[in-house]
Image: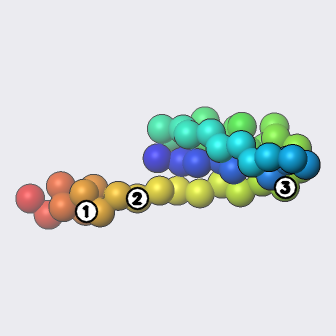
């Protein structure tokens, strides 16, 4: 999961994306202060081990 965080003048907006390509495209379009984060759940690692 990918999260795009935009810091605006009076608020913070967050958008969630399922794949990196879509998130990267929206990140490039966004103006201002922004952060793109990949969220990895510990359960994802448990599934790989079994």
Q: Does the CB distance between marks 2 and 1 fall below 8 Å?
A: yes
Q: Residue at x 70, y 38 (%)?
A: 25
> Quick one: label 2, few (<14), some, or many (20+) residues within 10 Å?
few
Q: Earlier in the sequence, mark 2 or mark 1?
A: 2
Q: Which mark is residue 40?
A: 2
Q: Give left or right: position of 21 versus 39.
A: right
Q: Position of residue 9 (x, y in %)?
A: 90, 49
Q: Nearer the viewer, residue 12 or 45?
A: 12
Measure the C-alpha gap from mark 2 to mark 1: 9 Å
Q: Nearer the viewer, residue 40 or 28?
A: 40
What is the image's colouring? rainbow
Up-down relation of residue 19 to residue 39 (above or below)? above
Q: Which mark is residue 33?
A: 3
Q: Does the CB distance between marks 3 and 1 fall below 8 Å?
A: no
> Quick one: label 3, few (<14), some, or many (20+) residues within 10 Å?
few
Whether residue 21 is visible here, answered yes or no, is no
Of circles 3 and 1, which is in front?
A: 3
Q: Give left or right: position of 40 versus 47.
A: right
Q: Earlier in the sequence, mark 2 or mark 3?
A: 3
Looking at the rendered structure, the secondary structure element under dot 3 is: strand
Question: For mark 1, what is the residue?
Answer: 45
Looking at the rendered structure, the secondary structure element under dot 1 is: helix
Q: Residue at x 84, y 55 (%)?
A: 33
């Amino acid at each position: 999961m990918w999260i795009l965080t935009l810091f605006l003048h009076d608020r913070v907006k967050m958008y969630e994306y399922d794949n990196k390509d879509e998130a990267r495209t929206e990140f490039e379009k966004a103006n201002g202060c922004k952060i793109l984060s990949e969220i990895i759940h510990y359960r994802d690692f448990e599934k790989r081990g079994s």
